Image (cartoon, rainbow, N blue to C red):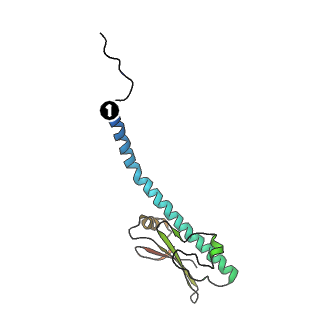
Amino acid sequence: MRGAPRLAGFTLVEMAIVLTVMAILAGLALPNVKDAVYRADAAKIVSDVRAVKLAVEEFVQENGSLPRSGRWRQVPADLAPYLAGMPFEYKTVEYRLISNRRRGVVRLRVRYPRRDPIGAALARYRRPGEVRWTNRRTDFYIVR
């Protein structure tokens, strides 16, 4: 007498092993993915800072004076045509343009929440000498 025919499929032990291996691989890959996202955010912020620098230079060349200061999250009215609708905020990061016409200096203030990973990634990404002053949640960039 022959035994009952064996059905094709996976046993419970085989499924548990496969799920365990997949969980280990996901645990190894997740920190790398998060770090890549923060580096991409930092690159976007640095790109925004450079876009503001170019817009200020273009404004000064055309008008012969510095643009007026703006408020948090608002593009100054003087620079709106030069920035082509760029928002002055990105995820948890806010921008503010500060203009000192007497000294001839324009600063861009970049503010992010305390202990925000974007701030840590930004600190690793920016060039030496690019930031004039920084504390735990604000960076000042000299635009002009």
Quadrant position of the C terminus in the picture: bottom right
Identity of the residue drawn at 36% across and 37% down: 18
Where disc 1 sits, the SS reads helix
Identity of the residue drawn at 62% across and 71% down: 83
Q: Position of residue 127 (x, y in %)?
A: 51, 69
Q: Which residue is the extreme one toward the right?
A: 62
Q: Is residue 139 above or below residue 1?
A: below
In the picture provided, is 77 more to the left or to the right than 41?
right
Q: Nearer the viewer, residue 17 or 144?
A: 17
Find disc 1 in the rendering and name its residue: 12
Q: Residue 123 is drawn in which quadrant?
A: bottom left
Q: Position of residue 64 (x, y in %)?
A: 67, 84
Q: Position of residue 20 (x, y in %)?
A: 34, 41
Identity of the residue drawn at 42% across and 73% down: 137
Quadrant position of the N terminus in the picture: top left
Query: How many marks are shown on the rendered structure?
Result: 1
Q: Is residue 17 above or below residue 80?
A: above
Q: Which residue is the extreme one toward the bottom?
A: 102
Q: Residue 75 is drawn in which quadrant?
A: bottom right
